[in-house]
């Protein structure tokens, strides 16, 4: 169950889904590389934004958030005073220290791509991160930023969708079905949603 403390979290802005979410995704991806003992083999990482992230990500600082997350910063604890100088250093050197421990090539213009007209299935806020050792793909993973800073990877999203469908008392695929269900069962719409 989601608590009020999950919904109201501290983080950098301007957007929880376009800034906090991507920063958490990038941090999680770096930690996954470390966990799989791949971090020290990474020469470079590429990030692609799709859907709403691809369209509005530049204005919301999604790319900057990814750089910070890959470097090991988290939205709850980063000192806002260091952000600009850190990003300038990455842009100037074209290098990024993953989790602050492994140096990698980071040509900012080629490392982050915003697909303004391409959306991945399942969710409008999608991003894919790929870690390479030269031309060798070490790890690729799709993530979704669900809003409020909540993130899931592709497998978790599929599991979440199945769980939500399995747990619903009333199957509602459209607004028309919602209206028919609430009328047919004598519930208000809010009571029907609570049942689900």
Image (spheres, rainbow, N blue to C red):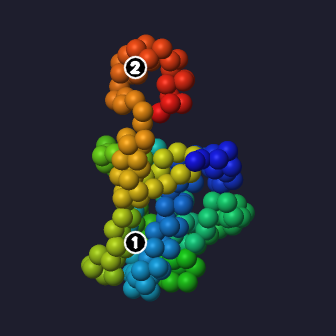
Which dot, 1 or 2, sits closer to the camera? Answer: 2
Asked if marks 1 and 2 touch (Cβ < 8 Å), the reply is no
Q: Which residue is mark 1?
A: 45
At label 1, counting other C-alpha atoms closer than 10 Å, the crowd grade (few under 14, some 14-19, many 20 or more) is: many
Residue 139 sits in quarter:
bottom left
Residue closest to the eye, 145 or 136:
145
Q: Position of residue 22 (x, y in %)?
A: 50, 57
At label 2, counting other C-alpha atoms closer than 10 Å, the crowd grade (few under 14, some 14-19, many 20 or more) is: some
Q: Position of residue 16 (x, y in %)?
A: 58, 48
Q: Assign a secondary structure to mark 2.
A: helix
Task: Give the residue at x 27% y 78%.
Answer: 135
Tell me: 155 left or right of 91: left
Tell which circle, 1 or 2, labels the residue nearer the N-terminal end.
1
For residue 81, above or below residue 114 = below
Task: Give the residue at x 58% y 79%.
Answer: 100
For residue 59, above or below residue 107 = above
Question: Would residue 124 be seen by someone viewing this image from the given angle?
Answer: no
Q: Position of residue 155 (x, y in %)?
A: 36, 59
Q: Assign a secondary structure to mark 1.
A: strand
Residue closest to the eye, 37 or 177:
177
């Amino acid at each position: 169950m989601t608590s009020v403390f999950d919904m109201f979290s501290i983080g950098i802005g301007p957007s929880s889904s376009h800034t906090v979410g991507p920063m958490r995704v990038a941090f999680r991806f770096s930690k996954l590389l470390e966990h799989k003992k791949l971090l020290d083999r990474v020469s470079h990482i590429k990030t692609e934004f799709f859907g709403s992230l691809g369209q509005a990500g530049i204005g919301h600082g999604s790319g900057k958030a990814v750089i910070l997350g890959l470097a090991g910063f988290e939205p709850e604890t980063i000192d806002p005073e260091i952000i600009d100088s850190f990003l300038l250093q990455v842009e100037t050197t074209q290098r990024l220290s993953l989790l602050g421990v492994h140096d990698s090539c980071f040509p900012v213009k080629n490392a982050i791509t915003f697909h303004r007209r391409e959306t991945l299935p399942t969710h409008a806020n999608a991003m894919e991160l790929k870690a390479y050792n030269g031309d060798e793909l070490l790890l690729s993973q799709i993530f979704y930023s669900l809003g409020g800073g909540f993130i899931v990877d592709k497998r978790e999203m599929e599991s979440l969708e199945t769980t939500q469908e399995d747990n619903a008392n009333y199957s509602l695929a459209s607004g028309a079905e919602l209206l028919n269900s609430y009328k047919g069962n004598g519930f208000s719409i809010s009571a029907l949603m609570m049942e689900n």
